Amino acid sequence: MQRYVIAIDAGGTFFKSAIISENAEVLPGSFLTVPANSDGSPEIVKEGYRRTITTQLRTAQKAGIEISAVAIDTPGPFDYEGGISLMKHKFKAIYNLPLRPWINEYAGDVPVTFIHDSAAFLTGEMWNSPYGEYKNAAGAMIGTGLGFATMMDGVVLRKPDGDPLYDIWCEPYDIGDGKEHIAEDFVSGRGIAARYAPGGRNAKEIELLATTGDEDALKVYRDTGTILGRAAAPYLKKVGAEIFILGGQISRALPLFEAELREALSDVTTLKKIVRSARLEYSHMFGAACDCFSKI
């Protein structure tokens, strides 16, 4: 019998979810977005999970299927085995609170698994996907921050605590102004906004300006490609990456910085493909589901 899980991408603004089968198929009509407030009280966060799970259980019932587990991807720091949030920069109100009892309160006595969001992204991109031929890979998520994960022999590399083995967000980057900078200061939505000379615009607006030929906007995105490539190159070499997959909202602008990214990665001799996410809205949920099915 086909197994299904409720997969939840627990972001700080929204909980996105879907019901996903072990054949990597999304149950039609199950994609759901529920507002979440990472600065809210425990009761507000719990309500986000309640709305998500109870809605998905009704969807499953209408479809005549049973839910085998709940799979959640979440940023860190997080105790992924224990199901306990250790974050202080967001979801502060649920710091050190066990989340499994909340989930089981609404989902019943089913397994509940947790996975780091960067590990989930890369897992989800590679699971039953067009990129399945590649066993060594890397993925970067460019949005409000800069996430990164690597894979060797089809397995995402992680530290004992479940975090990705390599990070690039904190890689030092020198722009010659005498100040200390890291890659995420430039390769992120806020970094792009901060580097656009006129100021006061967000990354999407700057992307639109770049597509119309605005030279300042074009330079910002081209530099983004260079900085990302330089930060990621050592780790792509370490794993012999054959494919580099970009996710997050900034990845939509890849054509604006792809040439510079390729140039910065030109000495990664194993690299065959640089692509945008094939599952931009779903990759985290696919990754959480794949990880869950491997455990239940």
Image: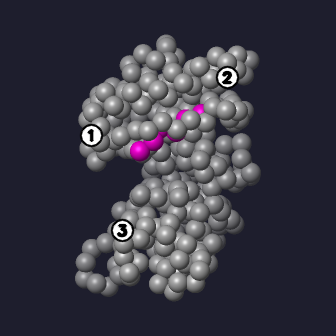
Colour scheme of the picture: one colour
* Mark 3: amino acid: Asp
Observer able to see residue 80: yes
Give x and y (percent) for residue 53. 50, 24
Q: Earlier in the sequence, mark 2 or mark 3?
A: 2
Observer able to see residue 238: no
241 vs 193: above or below: above
Q: Earlier in the sequence, mark 2 or mark 1?
A: 2
Q: Circle 1 is placed at which residue position?
A: 92
* Mark 2: amino acid: Arg
Question: Does the CB distance between marks 3 and 1 fall below 8 Å?
Answer: no
The residue nearer to you, when weighing 161 against 107, is 107
Q: Is residue 76 left or right of residue 223?
A: left
The residue located at (38%, 81%) in the rendering is 198
Dot 3: element: helix
Callout 1 crowding tier (Cα within 10 Å): few <14, some 14–19, many ≥20:
some
Q: Nearer the viewer, mark 2 or mark 1?
A: 1
Q: Circle 2 is placed at which residue position?
A: 3
Dot 1: element: helix
Q: Circle 3 is placed at which residue position?
A: 185
Give x and y (percent) for residue 204. 50, 66
Give x and y (percent) for residue 98. 33, 25
155 vs 227: above or below: above
Residue 16 lies in the magenta-colored region: yes
* Mark 1: amino acid: Lys
Callout 3 crowding tier (Cα within 10 Å): few <14, some 14–19, many ≥20:
many
Q: Image quarter for residue 263?
A: bottom right
> In whole angstroms, how far apart are the C-alphas of marks 3 and 1?
23 Å
> In whole angstroms, how far apart are the C-alphas of marks 2 and 1?
34 Å
Q: Quadrant of the C terminus?
A: top right
User: What main secondary structure does the magenta stretch of the protein show?
Assistant: strand
Highlighted magenta segment, given as a residue range: 13-18
